Every structure is written in C-alpha cells, then in structure tokens.
Image (cartoon, grey):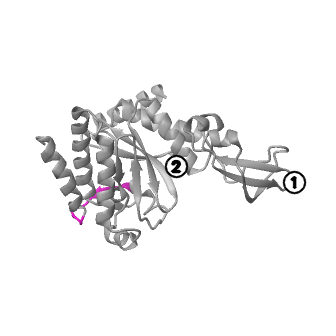
C-alpha cells in the first residue's frame, strides 16, 4: 500500500508540473492522504467480501433467508446480537450469518454488509494512525470519515464503494432522501448531514424525528462530556476543528456533472445557531482564533 501511495503522490505531482503549477483536483494531498486511497482500494478489492446471502457452508450452494436465529454465547461475546438464518436451495441445510459488531472479529470473518465494512475499515484506519470516525446515515447506510491533516478537514471514505471525498454520492448518485447523518468518534459526536447534501431545505422538511434545537443541544452536551477529561491543549485543537467544520456546513455544495465531491456555493442556513454553543466554549477557553 505504501508503494501505491507513493506512486499516486508522484503522479499527482507530475500532473501539477505538467499543468504549470495550476491547481488540479487532488493535488493538495500528501503521502498520508494517498495512503488512505490505497487502503480503500485494498479493502474493497482484496480484503473484505460483500454478503447478501451466504453460500451454504455444507455444499457451497445458494441459500435463501428463512428468518432469524438465536445467537450463541460465543457469538454474543463478539457482539453478534443478530443472527440471520438461511436455507440451502440445493441440500436444504441451514447456514447462519452472524452480524458481528466487534471490529476485531471482523478482521477474522472479513465479510458482511455496509455495517461490517465500515466497522472494520474504521478500525484499519485507526490501526494505521489515522483519526477516523464512524458515520451513521438514518436512511440505512454507514461509512467512515478520516481526518486529513494536510487538508485540515474530515474526508468522506466509503469502503463499500471505494469512494473518497465524494459526499454527494448518496443524494445525487444514489438518489437517497437523506435525513440525519451522525458521525461518532472517540472524541466527539457531530451531526454531519450538511456535508452530504446540496439541498438543505428539502432535508430540513424530512428531519422530523426531533426539534433541531434539541438535537444540537443534546450533541453539544455529549461532546462536553467527552471533552471534560481532555487535556486543555487537545480540547483547543478539537474546538478549532469544530468551528472550521461548522463553517464548511454553512457553505453547502452543489453537484457539478459527475463531480460528486461538490463545489461550494455561498449560502448560509440556520446552522448558525450551532456556532452559539461553540462560541461559548471559545470564550470559556479564551482562545485566539
């Protein structure tokens, strides 16, 4: 992967030189960013396997779902709380498909659907020293975000699609009617819905599970709880990142042809009130931003 990342970086550098130094998409990446691209490709093409219905463990034939089964103690040990049961269409034997939530166990099984993919990929990112967070889409999908030190922002990474920095892929590519998208990490919890839409007004009409202010306040309090035990230096870094991220959310994207990274258009919505909470923290910490 390191060799592939180095080659990618060399190609980007060469492309920049050939263009007389003019900025091109992707040329603000460094070796670590290119390593994420290599990791995504490896994970998708060589490491993990997508499973809709498992092959029969007795004869290798095709199976069909016949409901659920009770997890065993061993499966529960690895957070396999949900077990799907399948019957072989050839030999009629039953095959269990355990939906493990333990990322360490997933390094062994190396199969599943988007939940398993994102869970294990996030672990792989952290094992390589990247800051990564698990992203949950309320309309039934999950993926990862990785923090880029070079770009100073969180970057969308979907291992199921081998897709990096294409946040509009779900709304514009898949046609999903998004509602809530929440990112979870060791250090913070963030409503990142606004990174993944080019149509704020339509999403707001569908966000009816709770009042917006209640959600903002709840996430803020959860963050404060996480941050309470942080050293001041780390807390300051997190706070600055949060402000930068909220500014990004206040400049929505719009799709440009097949460019699902989106380009920003200056247009501010009611996300401004989230800054009120952050401002109070800035004032308390006496930060100079």
Does the magenta portion include 274?
no
Q: Nearer the viewer, residue 285 or 99?
A: 285
Quarter of the figure that contains the C terminus: top left
Q: Nearer the viewer, residue 8 or 277?
A: 277
Q: Secondary structure at mark 2?
A: loop
Tell me the residue at 49%/29% (across/down). Answer: 1
Q: Which residue is mark 1?
A: 92
Tell me the residue at 31%/66% (across/down). Answer: 212
10 in relation to 207, above or below: above
Does the magenta portion include 261?
yes
Does the rendering let one see residue 258? no
Give the percent coordinates (x, y) of residue 99: 63, 48
Left or right, 60 with respect to 245, comes to right
Q: Name, please, the residue furthest toward the bottom.
A: 205
Q: Secondary structure at mark 1?
A: loop
The first of marks 1 and 2 along the sequence is: 1
Q: Name, please, the residue furthest toward the top.
A: 3
79 in relation to 90, above or below: above
> Neighbour class for label 1 at 10 Å: few (<14), some, many (≥20)?
some
Q: CA distance from mark 1 to mark 2?
A: 33 Å
Q: What stretch of residues is rendered in magenta?
A: 260-270
Tell me the residue at 34%/50% (across/down). Answer: 222
Give the percent coordinates (x, y) of residue 165: 39, 48
Give the percent coordinates (x, y) of residue 62: 79, 52
200 in relation to 259, above or below: below
Depth check, mark 1 against mark 2: the one in front is: 1
Left or right, 159 with respect to 263, comes to right
Does the rendering let one see residue 127? yes
Q: Which residue is mark 2?
A: 161
């Amino acid at each position: 992967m390191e060799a592939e990342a180095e080659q990618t970086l060399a190609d980007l550098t060469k492309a920049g030189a050939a263009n007389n130094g003019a900025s091109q998409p992707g040329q603000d990446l460094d070796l670590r960013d290119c390593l994420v691209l290599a990791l995504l490709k490896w994970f998708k093409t060589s490491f993990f396997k997508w499973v809709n219905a498992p092959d029969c463990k007795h004869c290798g034939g095709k199976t069909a779902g016949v409901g659920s089964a009770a997890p065993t103690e061993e499966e529960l040990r690895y957070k396999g709380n949900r077990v799907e049961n399948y019957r072989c269409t050839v030999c009629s034997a039953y095959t269990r498909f355990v939906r493990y939530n333990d990322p360490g166990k997933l390094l062994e099984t190396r199969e599943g659907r988007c939940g398993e993919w994102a869970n294990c990929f996030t672990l792989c990112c952290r094992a390589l020293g990247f800051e990564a967070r698990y992203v949950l889409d309320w309309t039934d999908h999950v993926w990862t975000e990785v923090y880029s030190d070079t770009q100073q922002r969180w970057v969308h990474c979907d291992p199921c699609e081998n897709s990096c920095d294409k946040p509009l892929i779900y709304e514009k590519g898949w046609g999903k009617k998004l509602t809530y998208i929440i990112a979870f990490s060791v250090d913070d919890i963030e409503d990142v819905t606004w990174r993944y839409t080019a149509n704020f007004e339509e999403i707001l009409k569908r966000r009816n599970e709770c009042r917006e202010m209640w959600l903002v306040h709840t996430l803020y309090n959860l963050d404060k709880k996480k941050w309470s035990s942080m050293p001041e230096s780390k807390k300051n870094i997190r706070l600055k990142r949060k402000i930068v991220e909220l500014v990004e959310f206040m400049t929505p994207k719009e799709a440009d042809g097949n460019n699902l990274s989106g380009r920003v258009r200056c247009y501010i919505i009611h996300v401004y009130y989230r800054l009120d909470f952050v401002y109070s923290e800035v004032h308390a910490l006496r930060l100079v931003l």
